Amino acid sequence: MRRSVPVVLALLLAGPAVAASAGSTASTAALCGRGLKVAAQAEDGSVVCSHGPDARLDSGLGLPTDPSVPSAPCVGDGVAGTRIHVLYGVPSDVTNDYANKVDDVRAAVDAADAYFDGSDAATTQHLRWLCSGGAVQVDNVTLAPIGGDGAFTFQDMYNSLVPRSKGKKSTGPSYKDPNQVYVVFVDGIDNAYPYCGQGGVDADDSPGTSNRNNIGPAYSLIACWTGTTALHEIGHNLGAVQLSAPHSSGAYHCYDESDVMCYDDGGSYFVGPDGMSGTADDGLLTATCPAASTLLGGTTEDQQFDCNEDDYYNPAPAAGSYLATHWNLASSGWVAR
């Protein structure tokens, strides 16, 4: 299981084996890697790792979806090989509104793919969406209830996709294909989930297709239904942003302001050497890609997937550059080349 680490035996996330003692919370968290946390844990003790949920912002992750972008294409036959599998999910104690919301999901998917395709002017690239009937497939899935605690979590979503024998669970199919990244647009949780979304990621910056971020399955929860949020969480699923990246925030994001994967996340870059926010040594967002976006009506926010293509995505990195010698999302199995 990608980004999953069997605690009793050893390690999204199936990768190098790492042993830990059963029942040890500290050792389980340590398996996620530096700066990552356990986002969900399976009955077998395996864990899904993440930097944590992404904040709701007035800009950046919360930007509206542009309705004028083209439909996300179905690469190849739309089914074979690695695929990004889109789901509409709704807690069982919330009204299912799939018929009225599926077009909103597809609009966000279209915008996410358009952003990705527009990230490099010299090449055409798309994400490998799972399709049915010539269009991106959107499954209708009933999730665990919000319940009396009034909260919905990444763990609840995960339990719903990978059914368990106890606790909050789903009676539907199991979503754990190692060839798939599962992106779940969750409806009806505005008061139960105070974030924009969350995606699993592995702490592995090694180059080449054996990188742990290139092994599935992986999972994302999308609460802000925008193209930027969807692409941001998918970016995490595919391995962005590693702590070694040139413009790392220190918390699996970056600090290039015009970038889908960058915002002030309170990481070590933003708090500065003294580790305290609001002091003179705090790092600031930088604006190094001034060209206005054509996808959002000329606004300057979140116009590129990787500003200057130097932190996590470059289809043609220069020899000896960071992305030529470290994990590059252009090598991902979920990217069409």
Image: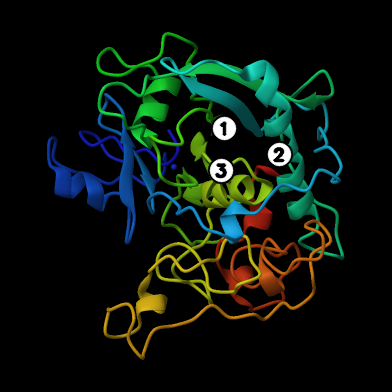
Above or below, 321 relative to 93? below
Kindly report the distance in space between the C-alpha atoms of the residues bearing marks 3 and 1: 8 Å
Color theme of the render: rainbow
Question: Circle 1: is it few (<14), some (14-19), or many (20+) Cα within 10 Å?
Answer: many
Earlier in the chain: of badge 2 and badge 3, it is 2
Q: Is residue 58 left or right of residue 66?
A: left
User: SS for tag 1?
Assistant: strand
Q: Position of residue 68 (x, y in %)?
A: 86, 45
Residue ID for mark 1? 185
Residue ID for mark 3? 224
Quarter of the image containing the N terminus?
top left
Q: Amino acid at mark 3?
A: Cys
Image quarter for residue 266? bottom left
Rendered image: mark on residue 163: none
Residue drawn at (42%, 8%), measured in percent from left and top?
171
Q: Residue furthest top?
A: 171
Closer to us: 175 or 82: 175
Above or below, 206 relative to 250? above
Question: Circle 2: is it few (<14), some (14-19), or many (20+) Cα within 10 Å?
Answer: many
